Image (spheres, rainbow, N blue to C red):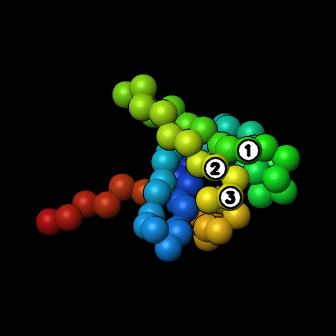
Amino acid sequence: MKEKTIVFTHSSGLRSYDFPESEIEEVRRILDKCLKGELHAMTHTDEQGNNSIYPSVYLQNCHILIRDKTEIHIY
């Protein structure tokens, strides 16, 4: 399964999470609603069951990048 990574760059730091490529339209729809102020927050639950909340005010002050997930090998 191909995955995408969404990266939020903010003055307070960098946050990111991975999601299946099949969910990209849903992620974009929710993100768009948050940026317009129609939703208060975007949430994500990772594979370990940890919840992350991205408030719309935070998202409105971020640089947001959605990219293909790549594996980096350090030798």
Instruction: Confirm or deny contact between disc 2 and disc 1 (CB under 8 A).
Output: yes
Instruction: Confirm or deny contact between disc 3 and disc 2 (CB under 8 A).
Output: yes
Q: Which residue is mark 1?
A: 40
Q: At numbered mark 2, what does the secondary structure look like: helix, strand or loop?
A: strand
Badge 1: residue crowd in 10 Å (few <14, some 14–19, many ≥20): some
The quarter of the displayed image where residue 27 is located: top right
Q: Residue 4, percent across and down?
A: 55, 50
Instruction: Confirm or deny contact between disc 3 and disc 1 (CB under 8 A).
Output: no
Amino acid beneath label 2: Pro
| Residue 57 tag number | 3
The answer to whether residue 42 of the structure is visible from this angle is: yes
Q: At numbered mark 1, what does the secondary structure look like: helix, strand or loop?
A: loop
Amino acid beneath label 3: Val
Q: Which residue corresponds to the image point at 43% horizontal and 67% vertical from the top-left?
A: 13
Amino acid beneath label 1: His
Quadrant in which the C terminus appears: bottom left
Q: At numbered mark 3, what does the secondary structure look like: helix, strand or loop?
A: helix
Q: Which residue is mark 2?
A: 55
Q: Which residue corresponds to the image point at 73% horizontal and 44% vertical from the top-left?
A: 40
The answer to whether residue 19 of the structure is visible from this angle is: no
Q: Residue 49, percent across and down?
A: 42, 26
User: What's the CA distance linking mark 3 and mark 2?
Assistant: 5 Å
